Image: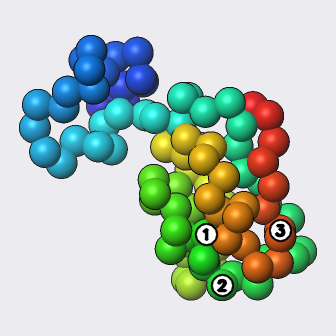
Amino acid sequence: MSKKGWKDIPIGGLIAKGGTARDYKTGDWSTSKPVRDESKCIHCLLCWVYCPDSSVLVKDGKMIGFDYEYCKGCGICVSVCPRKCIKMEKK
């Protein structure tokens, strides 16, 4: 099944049925993306806790990256990171 981009979402953002959020790629809305310096990351997962789009990828209790298909580039992860290992870069 092909996922829909923001241009394919009905005007007004109407989603007719529940449980379809993963069907719509929203990451292409952003102009910047978070990038992590792995050497500084302590895997506190505050970025994961505060991410409004569930775009922080975690495996075995460790942050492993970002899901750029759904990350809207809000920068909340940057502001909550205690080690300042995440920065925003232009897409």
> Residue 77 at x, y = what percent?
65, 62
Question: How would you rate the neighbour count of disc 2 (Cα within 10 Å): few for under 14, some for 14-19, many for 20 or more?
Answer: some
- Left/right placement of residue 62 relative to residue 81 reads left
Left or right side of 23 for 33 = right
Q: Quadrant of the C terminus?
A: top right
- For disc 2, the marked residue is 44
Q: Residue at x 66, y 52 (%)?
A: 75
Which SS class for mark 1?
A: helix
- Give amino acid for label 3: Cys
Specify the amino acid type for callout 1. Cys
The residue beneath circle 1 is 47
Using the numbered discs, state the Cα–Cα distance from disc 2 to disc 1 in whole angstroms: 8 Å
The residue that mark 3 highlights is 85
The N terminus sits in image quarter: top left
**Is 19 above or below relative to 85?**
above
Residue type for callout 2: Cys
Label 3 neighbour load within 10 Å: few <14, some 14-19, many 20+: some
- Please tell me in which quadrant of the rendered image residue 14 appears: top left
Please say if 34 is above or below 80. above
Count of picture labels: 3
Residue 36, horizontal then vertical, whole percent: 79, 61
Q: CA distance from mark 2 to mark 3?
A: 11 Å
Seen at 50% across and 74% down, the residue is 49
